[in-house]
């Protein structure tokens, strides 16, 4: 008896075996524009490796078989070891092999090095985001460690190495190392000044001196890093300490992992709670200046949050476009259905605007040589983290809806992207913290923000909606501090939307820029994706540009 009840038809496999870099016209153009085309061949090659079905499978495995904590060995010795699936190590080795950890600090005179780094991270983040945690923190630690020449001399080659080394050994015995951060405590969260972990000097103490740390961290990522930069109280206030996993004498440093966090997403990466039981560390920077020291590191990680969220948005978009091109509904491909075309085009606008913004921020980190560049780096970075990371949550949800139930199952890429998206809004400061940082940075450097507004007013010439937006932002600055804080989210949002509109106006086809401006600045334009009104020609331009076969 034949029990065949149906034949498989009109099902679309997720996009695999494609070139991530070569199919992303906005990214290719941005790399060229920043003078980073010397790295284009490497990005193209890496994009093809990442796009392989086998690499997607590694990402799926690393997130399905999550890290496991082993507190003790078989004979009762404390080891505090986290075991990972081999896929995790393969993905980290891929990233390390590209030299992306230190690329932005190599060959300081080479134009476009920050853009080259941002593009590489953006490609990797589309396939697997958890591995970005140790990679981001390690990269961000380099400029902080460079301020401590003696310590940095012992770590430089290992930080800059492109050779992956997963062994759990003292730093001196390793080919390459990863660094993490330890700030958050139970009682404080973003309020680092409420931290209670103490640091007691061994000897005279002071900058470069030895200390013993006692206390806890409520979020400690990633615990298998070879060392962490930790904030703790010393005699003169909060200071920053370099705390390795192994002490200089080769014994295990008593940083005891209490448990691993059971997170909503970011499953491949281990986040933990730890206790310091007189853990050995070296003071970095001036005593009592630990929070400014670690905040400098956070400035870099916030840029990476923007890059990571832009990457998630890009991957969600291309998977939705791929599905819509091949899935037939009511007799024709989904992409040819009028309402779906508008939704997908709106997602494409959001993704390209995020990509343009993260590339522009990367340039500011490289240059930082004028008031305008300082404004991009110090004021726009937290604003971008606030806005882009939130938009990633909404965009991934909309992209899942394009696939319907097929997007909602755990076997698919989009479900993982959706669970991954919120972490960048929370890590390194939630939305309100970012908006307050925007206002604080603007108050510290008002001349930089005004120089930026002058530059934007010139760029907005001939576009009344954008000129009005610049003027509205100027008027906000006349408000009292309390009044402006109440408008903090609106101020940050308007900053980012205007920045994105002007970037697209400069660098994208007119149809793309016009559609973005109309959908984000016209009165009555909705915030739900798919409410933008675009003509047939604009729709076609946006959709064709979004993913180039």
Image (cartoon, rainbow, N blue to C red):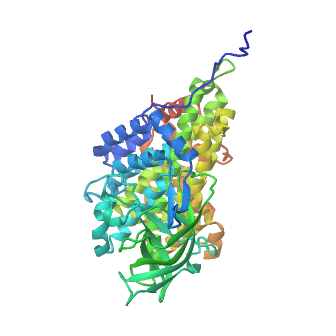
Question: In this rendering, does residue 336 appear at all?
Answer: yes
Judging depth in this view, the residue of 492 and 163 nearest the camera is 163
Which quarter of the rendering shows the C terminus? Answer: top left
Instruction: Please give left or right for residue 450 compared with residue 417 in the image.
Output: left
User: Residue 164, how many percent across, how many down?
Assistant: 36, 52
Question: In this rendering, does residue 529 appear at all?
Answer: no
Which quarter of the rendering shows the N terminus? Answer: top right
Q: Residue at x 44, y 49 (%)?
A: 89
Q: Quadrant of residue 218?
A: bottom right
Q: Quadrant of residue 409?
A: top right
Instruction: Please give left or right for residue 406 compared with residue 139 in the image.
Output: right
User: Residue 91, how many percent across, how many down?
Assistant: 44, 46
Instruction: Please give left or right for residue 242 compared with residue 4 in the image.
Output: left
Is residue 265 shown above or below 50? below
Judging depth in this view, the residue of 209 and 328 nearest the camera is 209
Q: Residue at x 47, y 61 (%)?
A: 224
Is residue 235 shown above or below 183? below
* In the image, farthest residue toward the front: 75
User: Residue 372, how many percent across, how many down?
Assistant: 40, 63
Judging depth in this view, the residue of 214 and 433 nearest the camera is 214
User: Residue 532, how many percent across, how many down?
Assistant: 63, 40
């Amino acid at each position: 008896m034949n029990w065949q009840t149906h034949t498989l038809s009109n099902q679309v496999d997720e996009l695999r075996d494609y070139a991530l870099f070569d199919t992303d016209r906005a990214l290719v153009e941005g790399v060229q524009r920043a003078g980073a085309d010397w790295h284009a061949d490497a990005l193209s090659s890496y994009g093809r490796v990442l796009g392989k079905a086998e690499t997607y499978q590694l990402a799926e495995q690393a997130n399905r078989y999550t890290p496991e904590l082993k507190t003790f060995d078989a004979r009762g010795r404390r080891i505090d070891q986290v075991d990972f699936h081999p896929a995790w190590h393969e993905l980290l080795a891929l990233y390390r092999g590209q030299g992306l950890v230190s690329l932005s600090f190599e060959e300081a005179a080479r134009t476009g090095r920050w853009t080259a780094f941002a593009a590489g991270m953006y490609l990797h983040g589309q396939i697997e985001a958890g591995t970005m945690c140790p990679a981001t923190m390690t990269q961000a630690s380099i400029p902080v460690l460079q301020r401590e020449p003696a310590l940095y001399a012992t770590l430089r080659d290992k930080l800059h190495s492109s050779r992956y080394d997963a062994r759990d050994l003292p730093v001196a015995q390793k080919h390459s190392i990863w660094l993490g951060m330890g700030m958050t405590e139970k009682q404080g969260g973003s309020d680092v000044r409420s931290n209670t972990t103490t640091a007691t000097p061994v000897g005279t103490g002071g900058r470069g001196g030895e200390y013993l740390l006692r206390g806890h961290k409520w979020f400690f990522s990633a615990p298998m890093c070879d060392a962490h930069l930790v904030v703790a109280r010393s005699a003169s206030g909060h200071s920053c300490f370099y705390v390795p996993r192994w002490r200089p004498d080769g014994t295990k440093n008593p940083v005891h992992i209490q448990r691993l966090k059971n997170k909503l997403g970011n499953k491949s990466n281990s986040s933990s709670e730890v206790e310091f039981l007189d853990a050995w560390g070296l003071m970095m920077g001036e005593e009592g200046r630990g929070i400014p020291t670690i905040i400098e590191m956070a400035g870099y990680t916030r840029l990476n949050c923007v890059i990571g969220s832009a990457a998630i948005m890009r991957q969600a978009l291309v998977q939705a476009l791929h599905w819509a091109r091949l899935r037939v509904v009511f007799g024709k491909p989904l992409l040819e259905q009028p309402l779906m075309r508008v939704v997908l085009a709106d997602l494409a606008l959001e993704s390209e605007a995020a990509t343009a913004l993260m590339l522009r921020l990367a340039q500011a980190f490289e240059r930082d040589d004028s008031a305008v560049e300082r404004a991009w780096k110090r004021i726009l970075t937290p604003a971008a983290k606030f806005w882009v990371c939130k938009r990633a949550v909404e965009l991934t949800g909309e992209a899942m809806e394009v696939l319907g139930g097929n997007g909602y199952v755990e076997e698919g890429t989009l479900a993982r992207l959706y669970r991954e998206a919120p972490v960048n809004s929370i890590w390194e400061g939630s939305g309100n913290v970012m908006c307050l940082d925007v206002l604080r940075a603007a108050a510290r450097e008002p001349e930089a923000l005004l120089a930026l507004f002058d530059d934007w007013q010139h760029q907005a010439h001939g576009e009344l909606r954008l000129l009005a937006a610049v003027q509205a932002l100027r008027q906000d600055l006349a408000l009292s501090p309390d009044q402006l804080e109440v408008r903090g989210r609106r101020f940050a949002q308007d900053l980012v939307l205007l920045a994105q509109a002007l970037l697209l106006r400069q660098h994208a086809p007119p149809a793309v820029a016009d559609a973005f401006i109309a959908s984000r600045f016209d009165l009555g334009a909705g915030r739900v994706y798919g409410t933008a009104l675009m003509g047939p020609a604009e729709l076609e331009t946006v959709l064709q540009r979004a993913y180039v076969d």
